Amino acid sequence: MAADSLLILLVDDYPDNRDIYVQFLTYSGLRVEEAENGHQALDKAFALHPDVIVMDLSLPGLDGWEATRRLKGDPRTRDIPVIALTGHALAGHSKGALDAGCDAFITKPCLPERLLDEIRAIHGTVPPRSGEPTS
């Protein structure tokens, strides 16, 4: 994996969810760091300055809504795109996530390919998946 590949911060409190997405994104040529709650997300975002943050909104302690507000309110991290990846599928939750500062909203369950497609759309520089032709 190239040292200049995108760094993704994946924030989810369920290890199984993290494992699935980390394996797929790593296989797709990205570097991935993990956080299991909002406080870890803030610490890692400030320290690592990832290219994209994938944020679960339902987290223990500091939830993803507030973690995103803090990230978007801080000059060090306000420009990092945040993709909400959440089980909150009720009407209004996507608007609430966007209002909190998320740049995109994906409902779980979500295939890893869908997440990669959203990372590509939001960042625009993700290499093609293995086996895909390059243009």
Image (cartoon, rainbow, N blue to C red):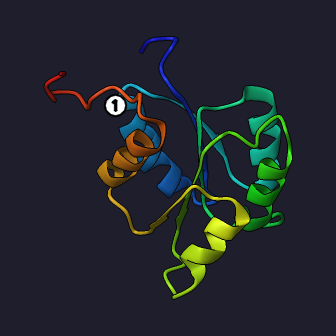
Dividing the picture into quarters, in which one does residue 58 lie? Answer: bottom right
Residue 114 in the image: above or below residue 79: below
Toward which corner of the image does residue 63 lie, by quadrant?
bottom right
Residue ID at (72%, 66%): 100
Percent across and percent down for residue 66 are 80, 64
- Circle 1 sits in a helix, a strand or a loop, which is it? loop
Task: Work out which quarter of the rendered image holds the C terminus and state it.
Answer: top left
Left or right of residue 67, residue 19 in this image:
left
For residue 57, say whether it is visible. no
Nearest the camera: 83 or 18?
Answer: 83
Image spot of residue 33 (x, y percent)? 61, 34
Q: Residue furthest bottom?
A: 91
Kindly identify which residue carries mark 1. 28
Q: Which quarter of the rendering shows the N terminus? A: top left
Which residue is found at the position 18% from the left and 22% from the top?
A: 134
Q: Residue at x 55, y 74 (%)?
A: 94
> For the residue marked with disc 1, what is the amino acid?
Ser
Relative to 11, is 93 above or below?
below
Q: Position of residue 49 (x, y in %)?
A: 71, 30
Closer to the camera in the image, 43 or 17: 43
Quadrant in which residue 60 is drawn = bottom right
Q: In the picture shown, does residue 54 fall above or below 65?
A: above
Q: Residue at x 83, y 66 (%)?
A: 61
Q: Is residue 118 above or below residue 62?
A: above
Regarding residue 25, the answer to whether it shows in the image is yes
